[in-house]
Amino acid sequence: MAATPAIPRRGLFIGGGWREPTLGRRIPVINPATEDTIGDIPAATAEDVELAVAAARDAFTRDGGSAWSRASGAVRAKYLNAIAAKIKEKISYLALLETLDSGKPKDEAVADMEDVAACFEYYAGLAEALDGKQHAPISLPVDNFKSYILKEPIGVVGLITPWNYPLLMATWKVAPSLAAGCTAVLKPSELASLTCLELGVICEEIGLPSGVLNIITGLGPDAGAPIASHPHVDKVAFTGSTETGKRIMTAAAQMVKPVSLELGGKSPLIIFDDVADIDKAVEWAMFGCFFNGGQVCSATSRLLLHEKIAETFLARLVEWTKKIKISDPLEEGCRLGSVVSEGQYEKIKKFVSTARAEGATILYGGDRPKHLRKGFFIEPTIITDVSTSMQIWREEVFGPVICVKVFKTESEAVELANDTHYGLAGGVISDDLERCERIAKVIQSGIVWINCSQPTLVQAPWGGNKRSGFGRELGEWGLENYLSVKQVTRYSSDELYGWYQRPSKL
């Protein structure tokens, strides 16, 4: 394993500066690839949330909002572009921190940082465009009223983000919320917070007005829950588990506070027997569930194969999977690093052992790689002979584990694809594009991929149905998440309205 560089010691980023948590507690940072403690992060509590929300509220209302919330979109765009430029300057460093913190391969972390910069740039463009959308007239069937709309920031927003793409998932919320004119309190996962704290450093460097973005780290019950229930947080956006999403909804409901939720998934990938290039389909099946160690909410972890190609496909899938380089994620060419923590490692192993106990076949993998004695590494795993009642079919693993079922007909494939409480994503691979379009319409998910899996484009909406949550991130829909629409109507006639009888003049 490569030597671990020193990790900078950061505090909480509140009101444009750094401070230690009120109770002075810190949480160790573990490199999941080595199991070494490489630093620590602040452990915020409700007292710190109070300070962060107060700073965000002050930034939102300061000078009547002219400093941020009511400033032009062009002003906010300058800051977002400046953040993007700094991200680009620091890509190698930020990718290194992300790899050390989460265990993902360095190549994947570099790609993440490129996406972070692109996301800030994209929302800078939408912030500028927002100026031109103000005072948009509403067509009315009468002449004595004139109406237009204003799009206004929703207020102070709480952003609670996961550990699988630490800075990227935070950016999906930070960039559009700031573009809209909101101020924010960001709470990343305690399992991977280093790059989000470095975002605070970047905000300092570019002179972002104090309190516009506040970053607190800590445990969910101590730092996340107080954000969701805080009376001065106007909206909560959350990405994470369905169970935590339910708790956030419950807390927000007490104040009728809007929430947007991107939760779990158990996405299907249907592969038909008409595919001419089996290897091409195999690679997409692997990418759909092994990329980022399978720690992807949209992972196509339920693989549905037509019976005519199942045997050939699985044999080829095993051959390809054997060639995946599993190593120290800093090594050149690594394609599967460690999972994020010991807890996640044990959870994945438990899923595999339960599948075996319930009668499924572990066709490949499921164990620690023999050449890696330390770190939270697990082999990419392929499970067959799966029934729809098994845990492995019904529950999200969040690891490099594919379960496989065979189908005979298109209608059976669709029925199996929709046999889930989740509805984030789904995919279909077939050389018959009419069939693909047909299936895209009936898969019950917010995202459908045709002849691929997992492409994520900042311009396209992202979000799910059913227990995968509601609301959409990315694209123009991501910006709308943080805007309130106001109707302004003016009576434009010189005449009395005439509803009441006018009294006679004295």
Image: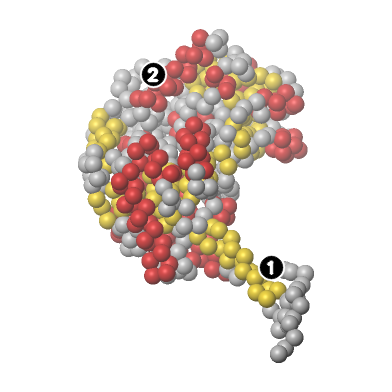
Residue 362 seen in render? no
Is 459 in front, or is 284?
459
Q: Image point 56% across, 36% down: which residue?
A: 468
Where residue 17 appears, as percent x and y from the top left, is 27, 56
- Residue topped by disc 2: 368
Where residue 368 appears, as percent x and y from the top left, is 38, 18
Q: Image point 40% across, 37% down: which residue?
A: 163
Q: Which quadrant of the rendered structure holds the C terminus?
A: bottom right
Total labels drawn: 2
Q: As shown in the figure, which amino acid type bears the numbered disc 1?
A: Ile
Is 451 in front, or is 194?
194
Q: As shown in the figure, which amino acid type bears the numbered disc 2?
A: Arg
- Residue topped by disc 1: 138
Q: Image point 33% across, 61% down: which residue?
A: 210
Left or right: residue 17 versus residue 402 is left
Give the secondary structure at mark 1. strand
